[in-house]
Image (cartoon, rainbow, N blue to C red):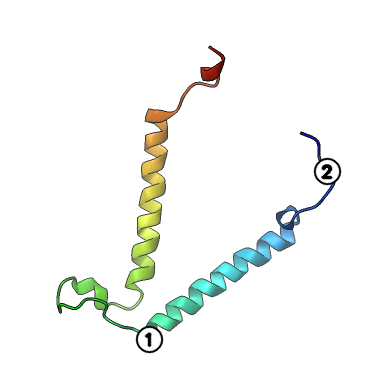
Amino acid sequence: MESSGKRHLFDDARNVKRIIRLLFVCCALLLAADFVLHRHPSFQEGVLRAEVWYGFYPVYGFVACVLLVLAARQMRKLLMRGEDYYER
């Protein structure tokens, strides 16, 4: 595959750093919004006590994402094929 010489958005390290900073700012704003607009989503009180904690859903989402990545790393060992799998 030949290089067309065209530079893309993520070719510049400064752009990558800007996007990462933007994501951090978005995360901080969403966490701050949780303090201001905190709503209990469950219709039944006391279903899950942790739901009333501030920042519960961001932490829950982060932990779930980390667990998914760790599970995928273990599944890779089980499902990965050899480098020459299609050449045989």
The residue furthest right is: 5
- What amino acid type should be assigned to the residue bearing mark 1? Leu
| Sequence-wise first label, 2 or 1 | 2
Q: Nearer the viewer, mark 2 or mark 1?
A: 2
Query: Image height check: is 11 above or below 4?
Result: below
Seen at 33% across and 78% down, the residue is 54
Instruction: Give the crowd class for mark 1: few <14, some 14-19, many >=20 residues within 10 Å.
Output: few
**Dot label at residue 55:** none
Seen at 38% across and 49% down, the residue is 68
Find residue 71 and report its horizontal and vertical position in percent.
36, 43
Seen at 15% across and 72% down, the residue is 47
Instruction: Give the crowd class for mark 2: few <14, some 14-19, many >=20 residues within 10 Å.
Output: few
Check if mark 2's residue and mark 1's residue have beta carbons within 8 Å.
no
- What amino acid type should be assigned to the residue bearing mark 2? Ser
Which structural element holds mark 1? Answer: loop
Rounded to the nearest angstrom, the CA distance separating label 2 from label 1 is 48 Å
Q: Is residue 4 left or right of residue 59?
A: right
The residue furthest top is: 88
Determine the image quadrant of residue 61.
Answer: bottom left
In this view, the residue in front, 5 or 34, is 5
Query: Image height check: is 86 above or below 40?
Result: above
Seen at 19% across and 78% down, the residue is 43
Residue at which label 2 appears: 4
Determine the image quadrant of residue 31.
Answer: bottom left
Find residue 17 and report its horizontal and vertical position in percent.
67, 63
Q: Is residue 48 left or right of residue 13?
A: left
Find residue 69 and report its horizontal and vertical position in percent.
41, 47
Which structural element holds mark 2? Answer: loop
Residue at which label 1 appears: 37
